[in-house]
């Protein structure tokens, strides 16, 4: 058998220097013990480890979840799940998991002070919250209700986060998104009009740029990306822009270890090369009236000479910004090699429109990150990959319809206080 073959070849390798070990190794023969398939039932569910919400199956043995795998019929994860899915049983049965509300009995607070939590029933906990909310309403201060939520599902986002606070009369509802994903969505939101995460046609892509993300280890679509790795390496070019040597970088043909916070400079330089080398996707973007490329480094272009198809403002972008961002200038800013920037930009242009610029949170989780997200995602437009084969796509929406409107239930108190300023200043110019 294969097992015995490996044992014998390993023993032969030891024979030269350690004959005693060989004798010991051959004296022990381990055979597989007879066993039968585990008895239980696979039950379909969904993972909430990230916003991909992968279809999974949980193995139920005597009422206990013992194993998790990707749904075998799923086309999104191909029957696999990432470590977050595999950890669900540990998370569920952790001995330290909090299973009911806790109430603080020590009014003193501070580092090293025991809050002296005691378990209470859900009814008691809900009564405490409801009584306090009624107290705020009776005092005419509904805006003092602060609602914080973490990872969301559809009901918690639409009903608790949205409806509850509006009916109550408080503008102060906050979610994890402000710290997690808002700028990543604003990039495509202010360029493409898509305020959302993106899906990617990895199966048909000829070039993928993992920019500030490592979807082999984190982010979304981890099982899907891992399953596509061999095909991507064989048929296309993998490029990673990341200060650290991530899993994606280790698997890529090109790794650009960019200086944190300089992604905008690199994106401008790549756009500069695409335009000066005539590598923009003309079917999607458009072209000069006479077919002659007038994108010359450092020189402006007359907007009247260029006819755009599915983009808007390309010439303005060139005249005000991109014309001056040579790879040499960006190399100094980003601490990269100018020739590598030029080489990467050409690889992206030659693969267009079957190219993906996968913008992740690393791009925009810094001051003024929305602008950085905009210029990085705009490369998908210059390359013509938006809604194209092997490019970026709008995410699939599985839900249809909306919850009924609650506008007629909002009283005057809620109307007067619910439109006030949020305490974090959101909405101010």
Image (tube, helix red, strand yellow):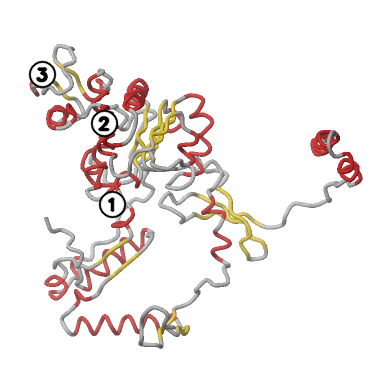
Return the x and y of residue 85 as percentages of the image width and height.
53, 53
Q: Quadrant of residue 270?
A: top left
Sequence order check: which comes first, mark 3 or mark 2? Answer: 3
Where disc 1 sits, the SS reads helix
Q: Viewer-proximal residue, 217 or 52?
A: 217
Q: Is residue 153 left or right of residue 296?
A: right
Q: CA distance from mark 3 to mark 2?
A: 20 Å
Sequence order check: which comes first, mark 2 or mark 1? Answer: 1
Where disc 2 sits, the SS reads helix
For the point 40% across and 52% down, the residue is: 51
User: On screen, 294 above or below 237?
Assistant: above
Q: CA distance from mark 1 to mark 3?
A: 37 Å
Tell me if mark 2 has few (under 14), some (14-19) or many (20+) residues whose alpha carbon lies within 10 angstroms of its own. many
Return the x and y of residue 171 as percentages of the image width and height.
20, 67
Return the x and y of residue 420 as percentages of the image width and height.
13, 68
Q: Quadrant of residue 147?
A: bottom left
Where disc 3 sits, the SS reads helix
Question: Which quadrant is the N terminus positioned in?
Answer: top right
Q: Which residue is mark 3?
A: 305
Q: Which residue is mark 1?
A: 182
For the point 78% across and 52% down, the residue is: 36
Q: Residue furthest front?
A: 17
Return the x and y of residue 298 as percentages of the image width and height.
15, 23
For the point 24% across and 32% down, the residue is: 268
Labels 2 and 1 touching (C-beta < 8 A): no
Numbered badge on residue 381: 2
């Amino acid at each position: 058998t294969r097992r015995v073959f490996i044992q014998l070849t390993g023993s032969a390798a030891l024979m030269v220097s350690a004959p005693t070990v060989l004798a010991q190794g051959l004296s022990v023969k381990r055979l597989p013990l007879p066993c039968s398939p585990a008895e239980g039932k696979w039950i379909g569910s969904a993972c909430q480890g990230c916003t991909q919400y992968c279809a999974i199956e949980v193995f139920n043995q005597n009422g206990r979840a013992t194993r998790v795998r990707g749904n075998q019929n799923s086309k999104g994860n191909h029957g696999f799940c990432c470590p977050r899915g595999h950890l669900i049983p540990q998370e569920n049965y952790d001995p330290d998991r909090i299973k009911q509300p806790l109430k603080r009995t020590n009014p003193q607070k501070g580092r090293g002070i025991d809050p002296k939590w005691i378990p209470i029933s859900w009814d008691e906990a809900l009564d405490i919250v409801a009584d306090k909310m009624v107290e705020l309403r009776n005092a005419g201060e509904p805006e003092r209700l602060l609602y914080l939520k973490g990872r969301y599902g559809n009901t918690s986002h639409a009903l608790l986060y949205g409806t509850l606070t509006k009916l109550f009369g408080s503008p102060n509802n906050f979610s994890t998104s402000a710290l997690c994903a808002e700028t990543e969505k604003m990039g495509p939101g202010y360029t493409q009009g898509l305020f959302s995460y993106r899906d990617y046609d990895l199966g048909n892509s000829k070039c993928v740029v993992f920019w500030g993300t490592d979807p082999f280890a984190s982010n979304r679509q981890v099982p899907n990306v891992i399953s596509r790795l061999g095909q991507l390496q064989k048929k296309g070019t993998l490029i990673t822009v990341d200060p650290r040597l991530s899993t994606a970088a280790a698997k890529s043909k090109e790794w650009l270890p960019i200086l944190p916070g300089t992604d905008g400079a690199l994106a401008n330089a790549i756009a500069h090369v695409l335009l000066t080398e005539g590598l923009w996707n003309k079917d999607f973007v458009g072209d000069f009236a006479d077919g002659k490329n007038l994108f010359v480094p450092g020189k402006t272009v007359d907007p009247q000479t260029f006819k755009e198809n599915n983009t808007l403002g390309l010439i303005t972008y060139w005249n005000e910004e991109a014309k001056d961002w040579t790879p040499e200038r960006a190399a100094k800013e980003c601490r990269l090699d100018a020739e590598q920037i030029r080489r990467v930009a050409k690889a992206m242009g030659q693969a267009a429109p079957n190219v993906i610029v996968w913008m992740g949170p690393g791009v925009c989780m810094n001051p003024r990150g929305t602008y950085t997200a905009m210029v990085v995602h705009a490369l998908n437009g210059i390359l013509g990959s938006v809604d194209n084969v092997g490019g970026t796509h709008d995410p699939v929406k599985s839900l249809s319809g909306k919850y009924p409107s609650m506008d007629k239930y909002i009283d005057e108190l809620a109307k007067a206080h619910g439109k006030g300023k949020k305490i974090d200043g959101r909405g101010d110019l």
